[in-house]
Amino acid sequence: MVREFFSGVRLLGAGLRMWVTAPRLMLIGAVPALLVAAVYLAGLVLLAVNLDAIATWATPFAADWQEPFRSGMRITTALAILAVTALLAVYTFVALTLLVGDPFYERIWRAVEKRLGGMPDELDQPFWPSVLRGAGDALRLLAATAALGILLFAGGFIPVVGQTVIPVLAALVGGWFLAVELTSFAFEARGLRLRERRRVLGANRARAVGFGVATYLVFLVPLGAVIVMPAAVAGATLLTRGVLERQPARA
């Protein structure tokens, strides 16, 4: 399992190498990420400025507590808010960037497929139904991410566990959903919908989570998402081909 996890991490590294082998293509892929990142940055700055006020609003029961317990509760709440915000922000950033930059990331996906021996036999899929289905899948994954985010937020109030275990769980959860979302191009081209995508990735969960966690953590670095987004699409294509090769012929 550990070996598989780090095999997934290396897939992101393989995607990053495309900045050397195909810099123009990757630079094009960074443009949508930069545009979406600018919007998210403004939102995150707004959150940071008002974080103390939000934490105070969320803990009215601690208003009459003695120090340092009142401040401790508010700091714990602020950290829990940041953890959940990071989880939701990273996933929604990827989903929105893939939607905005669909033609650019499709070119990256196709380039990787060709380098690995050619494209699969693609299905003839009408444009708008395909877009609507992709948006629907993204919303379904967002709902699942938000539900788990609420549980993680609640867990953030548990002493010690909330400051140690919960951030790790958030990275694992975020990594899984990123892997599912980023592999959409390659799976959809093979006629495999969300349910099948989750089944195949679930059978190779350690590798998928390794790739997703590496991507998730780099996305938390300022401007990391802009540089890594096109590389993540390339790495996700490698992940898809690798896990599908392990499946029975019917997959």
Image (tube, helix red, strand yellow):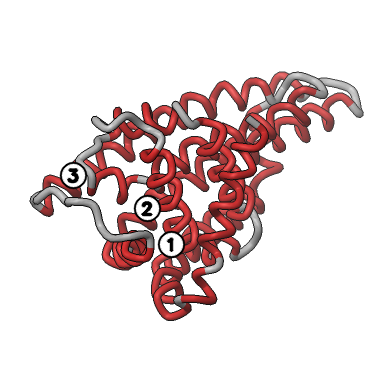
Left or right of 107 on screen, residue 207 = right
Q: Is residue 12 visible in this depiction of the protein?
A: yes
Specify which label sits upstream in the sequence, 1 or 3.
1
Residue matched to label 1: 36
Q: What amino acid type is highlighted by mark number 3?
A: Leu
The alpha-carbon separation of the residues under discs 2 and 3 comes to: 13 Å
Dot 2 lies on which element?
helix
Quarter of the image that includes the N terminus: top right
Foreground mark, 1 or 3, reads 3
Q: Residue 99's x, y, as percent?
A: 31, 55
Residue matched to label 2: 96
Count of labels in the image:
3
Q: Residues within 10 Å of mark 2 (few under 14, many from 20)?
A: some
The alpha-carbon separation of the residues under discs 1 and 3 comes to: 20 Å
Q: Answer above or below: position of 27 versus 35.
A: below
Residue at image point 27% right, 32% down: 249
Q: What amino acid type is highlighted by mark number 2?
A: Leu
To which quarter of the image does residue 203 belong? top left
To which quarter of the image does residue 181 belong? top left
Residue matched to label 3: 132
Quarter of the image that includes the C terminus: top left
Dot 1 lies on which element?
helix
Q: Residue 95's x, y, as percent?
A: 38, 49
Specify which label sits upstream in the sequence, 2 or 3.
2
Left or right of 187 on screen, residue 177 = right
Q: Residue 129's x, y, as percent?
A: 12, 45
Dot 3 lies on which element?
helix
* Front-lying residue, 148 or 29: 29
